[in-house]
Amino acid sequence: MPDSHDPTVVLRAVSPAEPDGHPDGRRRSWGNGFGMPAVLVAASVVVVLLVIAMARMMPTDANAQIPLAGASAGASAGPSDQTPLLAPPPLDPSASVSASPSSSSPSPSAKPSRSVTGAPVPAPVRSTTRASASAPAARTPVAIEAESGSIGGAATSAACATCSGGATVRNIGANDGYVTLTVAGVSAAGTYPVTITYELAAGSRTFYLSVNGGAAIQVPLSSTAADANTPLTATVRVALSAGTNTIKFSNPTADLAPDLDRIAV
C-alpha cells in the first residue's frame, strides 16, 4: 500500500509538438502577438464610422458648424434671427416688373436685368388741350390814322401839331358824330389788342366801339391833361374776323367822345 505522504511527483512527458505544455497550440497562437492587435484595430474602425454617421445626422447652421446646446436660449434673438438667410424679400402685390436688356448688342451670356418698383408705372397722359379759338394770331401792329377813315355826322378832321399825322378827328358823339376805320390783312379770326391814341382835356368821356356793324361796346376814358392837344393811349381787346374788318367810333348819346388821333391793330 503506497504511503500517502510519499513526496514523489509523477511528471508526464511533453511531446515536441507542444513545447509550452498546452494542447492544440492555443498558447502558441496568442503568444505570437497577432490576435489582440487585430481586434483593437477593428474596434477603432467601427468607432470612427459611428462618429462620422452621427456627425452627418446632426443639424448644422449656415456656416456648417454644429450649434451648441443652449446657445439660442441664452442669447436674445432679434427679428432677423427668425428669417432664413436665403429667403427672398417679400414683394409688393402691386409691384410692376420690367425687363430691360443689359447691353445694346445681344450675346449668348447676356441676360435681361429686372427692376422692381413699389407701385405700377402710370401710363403717359396725352394732352387734350387745344389752342383757344380766341387766341390772337401772330400779327405786326398796323397804325391807322383817324383822319383817313370814313367821317360822318358832326365829326370833323382838325389840324393838331402834336397829334400823329398832324391831325385828329373831333366832335365824335353828340348823337350822330362818328368815324369808321378799316382794318385789313387779318390772317385769322381771334381777339386782338387795339391801341387807341386820343386827346382829351382833364375829365372823362366815352367811346362806343362797333366791330363789323355789331353791337357797340363802351370804352370809358379819362385824362388829367391841361388841354386837348396831348396824345394819350389806351388798349382794349376786340374780336376780329379773318380778312378785312371795320371799327366804328361813336357816342349815340348827347355826350361827346374824346378826339380820336389813330389806332394800332
Image: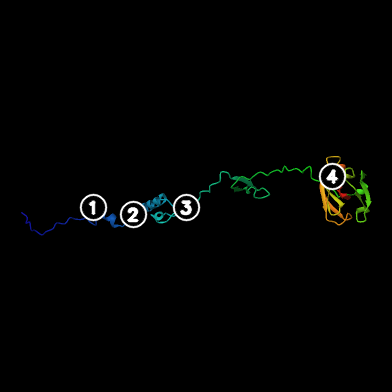
Residue 208's disc number? 4
Q: Amino acid at mark 4?
A: Tyr
Q: Position of residue 259 (x, y in %)?
A: 88, 50
Q: Which mark is residue 38?
A: 2
Q: Residue at x 31, y 55 (%)?
A: 36
Q: Is residue 97 above or below residue 1?
A: above
Give the residue displayed 81% in from the left and 48% down from the top. 220
* Disc 3: which residue: 79
Mark 1, residue position: 23
Q: Amino acid at mark 2?
A: Ala
- Amino acid on which the number 1 mark rests in the picture: Pro
Instruction: Identify the residue at the far bottom of this view.
Output: 7
* Residue 238 shows in this picture: no
Numbered disc in front, either 4 or 1: 4
Q: Secondary structure at mark 3?
A: helix
In the visual, does 9 lie left or right of 126? left
Q: In the picture provided, is 29 more to the left or to the right than 187?
A: left
Task: Please say if the residues under marks 2 and 1 sit with CB atoms less than 8 Å apart.
Answer: no
